[in-house]
Amino acid sequence: MKQEILLQYKQKLIQRRYSVNTQKTYLSLFKKFLHRFNDKAINDISKAEIEGYIYSLIRTENISFSTQNQIINAIKFYYERVLNRERLTYWIERPKKEFKLPTVISEQSILRMLTSTNNIKHRCIIALLYSSGIRRSELLNLKKGDIDYERMMITIRGGKGNRDRVSLLSQTFMQSLIEYLQIYNPKYWFFESPTKKKYSSTSVLNIVKKAARKAGLAQKVTPHTLRHSFATHLLEHGTDIRYVQDLLGHSSIKTTQIYTHISDTSLRKIISPLDRVMSLNLNDVKPLEKVIY
């Protein structure tokens, strides 16, 4: 019975064109939910029991806000999409969204990462992640024909939300990409494993982390850090936020606006009050008047 439910669940995810990553995440979370109520029919599970399940995960596993939301969405998907129940008949309290600033590294740090990477394939991976702002999954899904060397554009197909978009191709790194293709001669995917299969997500992460370590960076650097840095650096150099939104593939401008909080263009114009204090001439400072109590 449980296997039949999971099969229905997966088929509905595919029908609704959810991305492969989302399918894996939802299925994993929903399997865990089914296992928790293994001795009970899923249609008999009450709202209170589901809330108790989520609260127990918060207490025992200290799940994050985003994970809690994913669990809620995975459960709601079954009741609302697979069983076609009304959305308002099933409701779980959601957490307040955390406001965390993304990690960004400087342009100098990007250069140090690139120059400290000798392997041309690894260097091209880092360069593409930063120069186009694409996600790791989008990089792995790139095909040879997705890069237009004449128009200097990269086509990202089936990005987040199954939306296609275009992004920038770096002029200074184009020759390195061509050289990489000549050396590795990938068959289908732009980046492939030695067996000519799609390159692994873990390999990309390890390449970025190793480059950051060799460059002597103290921050924790991931492929998404390069995406954050791409957006922030564009804004710092005066690129209109609407263009940055399109390049990142954000459906809402509010998502892109988070980068305005970490752009240091405006901060550079603000002088620390301590700098003002330390610039004062002590001879010009009036002595304190004595106060008689």
Image (cartoon, helix red, strand yellow):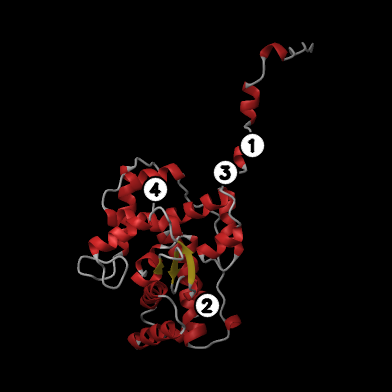
- The residue beneath circle 4 is 220
Q: Please tell me which of labels 4 and 2 falls first in the chain.
A: 2
Circle 1 sits in a helix, a strand or a loop, which is it?
A: loop
Circle 2 sits in a helix, a strand or a loop, which is it?
A: helix
Q: Amino acid at mark 3?
A: Asp
Q: Give the CA distance from mark 4 to mark 2.
A: 40 Å
- The residue beneath circle 3 is 264
1 vs 2, front mark:
1
Q: Which quadrant holds residue 20? A: bottom left
Where residue 45 appears, as percent x and y from the top left, is: 47, 81
Can see residue 203? Answer: no
Q: Badge 3 local density, few (<14 within 10 Å), some, or many (20+)?
A: some
Does residue 27 appear to the left or right of 262 in the view shown?
left
Mark carried by residue 47: 2
Q: Please tell me which of labels 3 and 1 falls first in the chain.
A: 3
Q: Badge 4 local density, few (<14 within 10 Å), some, or many (20+)?
A: few
Can see residue 138? Answer: yes
Kindly identify the residue that appears in the image at 56 percent across and 55 percent down.
99
